[in-house]
């Protein structure tokens, strides 16, 4: 739903309870405690806390991969730069299909191959226990 940021609390000039309005993905809200919250894919549709900025769509995937405790730095950019970065990001996503190659297997069935790939750390086969 969101990423809770920590650091120096942001002060509210005229209170933190505002009329609810629409929330875009990446909106940065500042509730009463002053710690910013970056709203992500499962965010609510409206909210009544002040919003101080919006993380551009091209940066949201990297922000979502940030580790707990990692330092995040924000930089103000204009709409033209944000749109250009989005275009580049979408081109990178489209290019993924060109880099995908078929899986080549020896005689193993797909289940044996997937169990051996350790796709999820800590997964076990319940049938062999």
Image (cartoon, rainbow, N blue to C red):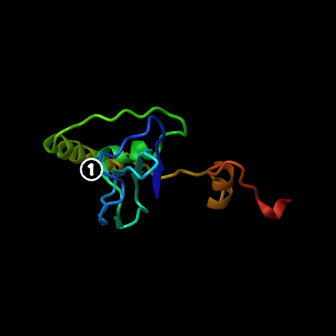
Which residue is rendered at x = 36% and y = 59% of the image? 17
Q: Residue at x 66, y 61 (%)?
A: 111
Q: Position of residue 84 (x, y in %)?
A: 18, 43
Residue 67: percent from left, percent from top = 53, 39
The total of numbered circles placed on residues is: 1
Query: Residue at the front extreme?
Result: 14
Q: Is residue 107 visible?
A: no
Q: Which residue is mark 1?
A: 90
Q: Residue at x 32, y 49 (%)?
A: 93
From the viewer's side, name the closer residue of 28 and 35: 35
Residue 121 percent coordinates (x, y):
67, 48
Callout 1 crowding tier (Cα within 10 Å): few <14, some 14–19, many ≥20: few
Viewer-side residue, 85 vs 92: 85
Q: Is residue 112 left or right of residue 39?
A: right
Query: What SS does tag 1 mark?
Result: helix
Left or right of residue 106, residue 6 in this image: left
Classify the position of the C terminus by image quarter.
Answer: bottom right
């Amino acid at each position: 739903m969101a990423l809770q940021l920590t650091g120096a609390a942001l002060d509210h000039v005229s209170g933190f309870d505002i009329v609810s309005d629409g929330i875009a993905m990446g909106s940065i809200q500042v509730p009463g405690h002053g710690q910013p919250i970056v709203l992500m894919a499962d965010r609510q549709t409206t909210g009544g806390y002040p919003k101080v900025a919006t993380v551009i769509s091209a940066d949201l995937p990297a922000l979502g991969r940030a580790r707990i405790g990692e330092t995040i730095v924000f930089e103000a950019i204009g709409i033209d730069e944000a749109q250009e970065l989005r275009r580049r990001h979408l081109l990178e996503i489209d290019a993924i299909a060109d880099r995908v190659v078929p899986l080549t297997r020896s005689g193993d069935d797909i289940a044996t191959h997937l169990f051996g790939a350790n796709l999820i750390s800590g997964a076990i086969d319940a049938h062999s226990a």
